[in-house]
Image (spheres, rainbow, N blue to C red):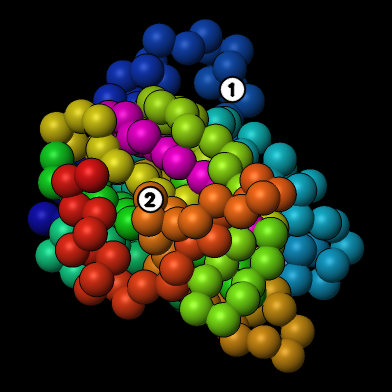
Amino acid sequence: MLRRDLLEAFTAYALLAELGSSRAARRTPSTRAWLDRQDELARALAARTIDSESWRRAVEALGREADLERLVADALPSPSARALPTYPERRILRYRDADGRPRQQRYAVALFQFDRTSVITPHGHRGMQSAHLVVRGSLRARTFDRVDEVPGALLLRPAGDRRLGTGEVSSIGPARENVHWFVPLTESAATFDVVVTGLEPGGPDFQVQAVDPLDGTELSDGTLRAPLLGFEESARRYAGR
């Protein structure tokens, strides 16, 4: 049942893929090749042999060429869960290697499924980078550069406010577009996410920090002092905004 639900989540993407040329279809990598390339990039990012912006460009390009129907059909999905009632449903997607064993990889894959009331509230990140491919519907994606952290707040600079449709990707870096906020613009939407953690030597494996940019204070240099929030308070303030 879970796999059928996942496949249905990608119907819109599959229909778009059918409209592509056969030449483009031949360029689509196999599931194994796509996952292997993601692992190469994740390991290079963790080893600092590529920088954060190079990883973002490469992973966004991989997202645009992914065979999502195949990636979903080959996945071993976890049960769905919500971090909070106003958050989208999340499933972790795992894969097997050529010998049928669970793949050992340096990154995680997740599917987020939004209904009209689901919101991923504004939050920043430490020790991680991620990329988010829209595979159904559309989302409003607001992003902020992370300039600094001060007691009780993050200093941010607005970076983007755009509509992401099916096939478009948004990603984060340690500073560039580190804070993001996703709100569905359609009755349902879904994202296919790739996440790499453990990127901050001596720091946490990862940390997610809810912030309040709408009630932040604009400073003289154009940055925004956005107070840190608890996630339940963040959900209360940002649900429906």
Q: CA distance from mark 2 to mark 1?
A: 46 Å
Residue in the image at 64% along x and 35% along y: 61
The disc, 2 or 1, on the residue closer to the chain's N-terminal end is 1
Residue 118 at x, y percent in the picture: 19, 50
**Which image quadrant for residue 134?**
top left
Residue that badge 2 annotates: 214
Please state the total of marks drawn on the protein image.
2
Residue at the far front: name it.
220
Checking the image for residue 26, the label placed there is 1
Identify which amino acid the numbered label 2 is placed on.
Leu
Q: Is residue 151 left or right of residue 234?
A: right
Q: Considering only vertical position in the picture, is 156 above or below 171?
A: below
Quadrant (top left/top right/bottom left/bottom right) for the C terminus: top left
Instruction: Tell which of 187 and 50 is nearer to you.
Output: 187
Note whether residue 51 is visible: yes
Q: Is residue 145 visible?
A: no
Observer-side mark, 2 or 1, equals 2
Residue 69 percent coordinates (x, y): 36, 37
- Apparent side of residue 131 relative to residue 12 in the rendered image (left or right): right
Q: Is residue 209 left or right of residue 174?
A: left
User: Quick check: 119 above or below 188?
Assistant: below
